[in-house]
Image (cartoon, grey):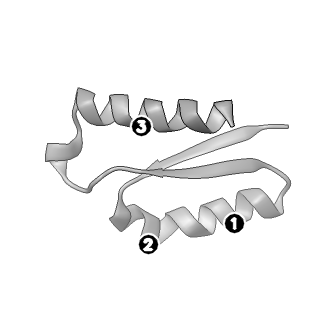
């Protein structure tokens, strides 16, 4: 089974995130939403590390 991680900020979630998640699930894929705060200030190595930690927690459960 293919797995997808949808990484988005809250603004993108409203526009596309939830709809994309629902489409993937309806088509038999496993998908998860992961979020980080909107804005250029959030595009850091720390944010990347936090997202990686969230992904790893999902994989282990």
- N-terminal label among 2 and 3: 2
Which quadrant of the figure has residue 50? Answer: top left
**At numbered mark 3, what does the secondary structure look like: helix, strand or loop?**
helix
Q: Is residue 50 left or right of residue 17?
A: left
Front tag of 3 and 1: 3
For disc 3, the marked residue is: 51
Crowding around mark 3 (Cα neighbors within 10 Å: few <14, some 14 to 19, many 20+) is some
Relative to 15, does residue 36 appear above or below in the rendering? above
Indicate the position of residue 7 as horizontal and vertical percent values.
Answer: 47, 47
The residue most toward the bottom is: 14
- N-terminal label among 3 and 1: 1
Q: Quadrant of the C terminus?
A: top right
The CA distance from mark 2 to mark 3 is 19 Å
For disc 2, the marked residue is: 14
For disc 1, the marked residue is: 22
The CA distance from mark 1 to mark 2 is 13 Å
Q: Residue at x 17, y 46 (%)?
A: 40
**At numbered mark 2, what does the secondary structure look like: helix, strand or loop?**
helix
Indicate the position of residue 18 as horizontal and vertical percent values.
Answer: 57, 67
Relative to 14, does residue 54 appear above or below in the rendering? above
Which quadrant of the figure has residue 60? Answer: top right
Q: Residue at x 23, y 39 (%)?
A: 43
């Amino acid at each position: 089974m293919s797995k997808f991680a949808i990484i988005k900020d809250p603004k993108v979630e409203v526009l596309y995130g939830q709809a994309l998640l629902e489409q993937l699930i309806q088509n038999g894929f496993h998908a998860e939403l992961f979020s980080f705060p909107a804005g250029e200030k959030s595009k850091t190595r720390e944010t990347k590390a936090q997202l990686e930690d969230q992904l790893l927690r999902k994989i282990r459960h």
